[in-house]
Amino acid sequence: MQNLFKDFFYFTRGEKRGILILIAAICIVFLGGYLISARQRRNQMSPDDRSLQATSQQAYEEFITSLEEQEQSGKKQYTSYKQKNEESIPIILTSFNPNTADSITFRHLGLPAWMIKNVLHYRAKGGKFRKTEDFKKIYGMTEEQYSVLSPYIHIPPEDTARHTSQLYITQTVPVENIKYETGTVLDLNLADTTELKKIPGIGSGIARLIVGYRQRLGGFYQIKQLKDINLDIQQLQAWFNIDPANVHRINLNRTGVDRLRSHPYINFYQAKAIVEYRKKKGSLTSLKPFSLYEEFTKADLERISHYVCFE
């Protein structure tokens, strides 16, 4: 059976060549038929279709051409306008005051629009040209432009002088410069900034410093506390006395951590220790329990004692 199958599909060399030629001929026939069919379909297109296709192609080409012409025309018009605009403003060098000249005057002097804008902006902000050299400082001004314009710059005397007459309207001495006579004594916890400035050696800054620190403390209990804000108490102690009744005290049994730590003499850890003790042990009656806490020194407890109560 196998020999029969082999003999059936066996071909000589000449037969194989003939089969290949036959297959090639069949392919050529089918390909030729397809090409002929496609050509016939194209030839069968109606005259209207061919006309429509030709019209669309022509319209597309005309549209592209019109866009190119408009672009070229726009460039020509812009160039023509620019040249006309530049030629319409002739350069006229004449005397001018940079403090009063308008934009047209500056244009006739040859300055570009953006530089004129800088000049007008400078004047609008209160700027003033007091001497010829000041005009050179305008942003964008070149050495060449300044050398051409400087001979024509004219600044009248009233623009060159600085008006200082306002400084001498009155010769009266300001209130804060009136000082107390020696021997005057003020309560350091009650004096306001106006009174403090009348003490020799105290100006506005020091007066505000004293009042501000006094408010943070709740009042002073001794003159030496002025050292906390770096003031020389040797010169100031003769001018002040202190009434301890004017010191504001903090109730340690009701005050929270944030309020306690805002005091200059109590830090965060000390404030937290006070509140924690109060929660665990109950109401406080003195500061003695905190003498065993590492957060407090003896000096801390002494100065805090002037600002606390246990109501």
Image (cartoon, grey):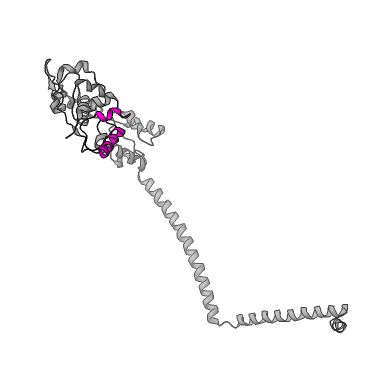
Main SS of the magenta segment? helix
* Relative depth, front residue between 35 and 231: 231
Residue 264 quadrant: top left
Residue 184 in picture, x, y percent from top left:
11, 18
Outermost residue on the front side: it is 281
* Relative depth, front residue between 79 and 295: 295
Kindly identify the residue that appears in the image at 26 percent across and 24 percent down: 228
Residue 172 quadrant: top left
Q: Is residue 12 left or right of residue 302?
A: right
Tell me where the magenta segment starts and ends, as one range.
265-294
Residue 53 in picture, x, y percent from top left:
53, 75
Q: Is residue 37 left or right of residue 128?
A: right
Question: Would residue 190 be seen by someone viewing this image from the given angle?
Answer: no
Kindly identify the residue that appears in the image at 22 percent across and 24 percent down: 206
Instruction: Pick the quarter of the image with the C terminus.
Output: top left
Magenta stretch contains residue 267 = yes
* Relative depth, front residue between 224 and 114: 224
Residue 113 in picture, x, y percent from top left:
35, 43
Question: Would residue 80 be seen by someone viewing this image from the given angle?
Answer: yes
**Can you say whether 298 is above or below 7 in the image?**
above
Residue 226 in picture, x, y percent from top left:
22, 22
Instruction: Pick the quarter of the image with the N terminus.
Output: bottom right
Residue 288 quadrant: top left
* Relative depth, front residue between 130 and 125: 125
Magenta stretch contains residue 85 = no
